[in-house]
Image (cartoon, helix red, strand yellow):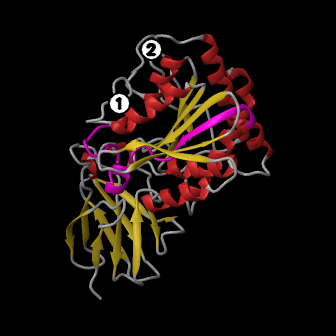
Amino acid sequence: MTVTVSAAFDGGNIEVVRCDGPQAIDLAIRRDANSDFYQWFYFRLSGVGGEACAVRIVNCAGSAYPGGWPDYRAVVSTDRLMWTRTATTYADGVLTIAVTPAADSVWIAYFAPYPMERHHDLVARIAAARGVTTRVLGQSLDGQDMDLIEVGDGPLQVWLYARQHPGETMAEWWIEGALERLTDPADPVAAALRAQARFHIVPNMNPDGSRRGHLRTNTAGANLNREWAGPTLERSPEVFHVLAAMDATGVDFAMDVHGDESLPHNFIAGFEGIPAITDRQLGLLADYKAGLARISPDFQTRVGYPPSPPGKANLTMSTNQLANRFGCLAMTLEMPFKDAAENPDADAGWSPERSMALGRDCLAALLEVIDRLR
C-alpha cells in the first residue's frame, strides 16, 4: 500500500519533503501566514497499518521555540478521539517520530488538536445549559465569528479567554473543562460563582489561526497577545472586539489561557511591572496562586517566567493591559506541551483530560478569592 501524507483539513500543518516509504518520511512545518513563526504540526499518515514508521521533521532548528523539542513526545491517534504519546527524539534540528499504527491511518500532532468543528459543538452544547447566553462580538479577518459565552448573575465581571496563540490547543481544552463545571447545576462551587459573578468566556480568540494550522498568529501575521495596547479592525479585529466588550462590562478578574513549549510545568504569569500596580492586586495574585497549588497537584509556583521590573511591563500583552486598565486581578495561565514534571504520565503526558481538570480546579481557586475582588 502506498504511504501518503496529508494535512488538508481543519488545523492541519505540514509540507512533504520526501515520502519514499514508512521509514523514509521527511517533512517540514509550514510557517504561519505573513509571519516567521512555526512550531505547530498536525498531519495524517495513510497506508501505514502495522508498519514501523520513522517520520522526520527536518526544519525544527528554525522554529519559534527550538528549546521546546528536547524531551518532547508527539501525540498520535487512530480515531482522533484518544491521543497518546509516542517515541520522539530530537537531534541536529531534526525531530524524529516513531510510530507503528494498528490501523491504516494515523494522525500525528504537536498536541491533541481542538478543531473548529469541536469549538462549534462546544458553543452549541453549552448554549443549551440553563442560564447561558451566547453572542457574536464580531468577525475575524477570515470572517469567522468571535463567540462569547456568558453565564452567572452576580455583580463581579469575570473574563476567561483562550487560544490567542492558536497552536496552544490545551487552552481550549481547559475552557471546555471550566465551562462544563461552571454550567453544572449540581456543582456547589459553580453555583456559588454564578451567584457572585457574571462570567464572560471567549473559547477561541484566534479562529483563523486555528483553522489555518498556525502556531501563534492570525491571518495578518499578528501575534494577538501583542495587540492589546491599540488593536485595529485591519490587523487584529479579534482583540478589538473582545477589548471593546471588556470596556463595556468592566473587568474584576481575567485569565488568559496559554501553553508553553519549553517548560514542563503548569504556572501563572502575573502583571508585575505595570505602572498602576497596587499592593491589593499583588496580594490577590499571590493568594490565588497559593490556593490553586493547594487544590491541584498539577499546578506549582516554583518555576515560571521572571517578572518584569517595576514600570517595565509590556502593556501590549493582555494580562498587563487589563490589570493596568481596570485595576483588576489578571493573570496568564501556562500549561505544558510536554508533560507536567510534578505529576508525569508516561502514556498521555499533559493531555486534554488534564487540561480540562485544571480548568475545573481554577474555578475552585477563584471561589477562594472572589469575595475580595469587589
Instruction: Determine if the magenta segment contains residue 203.
Output: yes
Please state the total of marks drawn on the protein image: 2
Rendered view: 320 above or below 105: above
Query: Upstream in the sequence, badge 2 or badge 1?
Result: 1
Q: Position of residue 146 (x, y in %)?
A: 43, 45
Q: Position of residue 82 (x, y in %)?
A: 54, 68
Residue toward you, 166 or 185? 185
Q: Position of residue 263 (x, y in %)?
A: 48, 41
Residue toward you, 361 or 176? 176
Rendered view: 311 above or below 10: above
Residue toward you, 155 or 212? 155
Going by the image, does 180 lie left or right of 60? right
Quarter containing the C terminus: top right
Going by the image, does 168 lie left or right of 326? left
Residue 309: numbered disc: 2
> Helix, strand, or loop for circle 2?
loop
Instruction: Determine if the magenta segment contains residue 214.
Output: yes
Decide if residue 351 is in sight here: no
Q: Position of residue 367 (x, y in %)?
A: 73, 33
Going by the image, does 185 lie left or right of 14? right
> Helix, strand, or loop for circle 1?
helix
Residue 27: numbered disc: none
Residue type highlighted by circle 2 = Pro
Going by the image, does 131 lie left or right of 278? right
Q: Can you identify the residue that label 1 sits on?
A: 226
Rendered view: 16 above or below 147: below
Residue lying at the far bottom of the rendered structure: 1
Which stretch is magenta? 195-223
Residue at 49% x, 74% y is: 79
Residue type highlighted by circle 1 = Arg
Decide if residue 34 is in sight here: yes
Select label 2 or label 1 by which is in front.
1
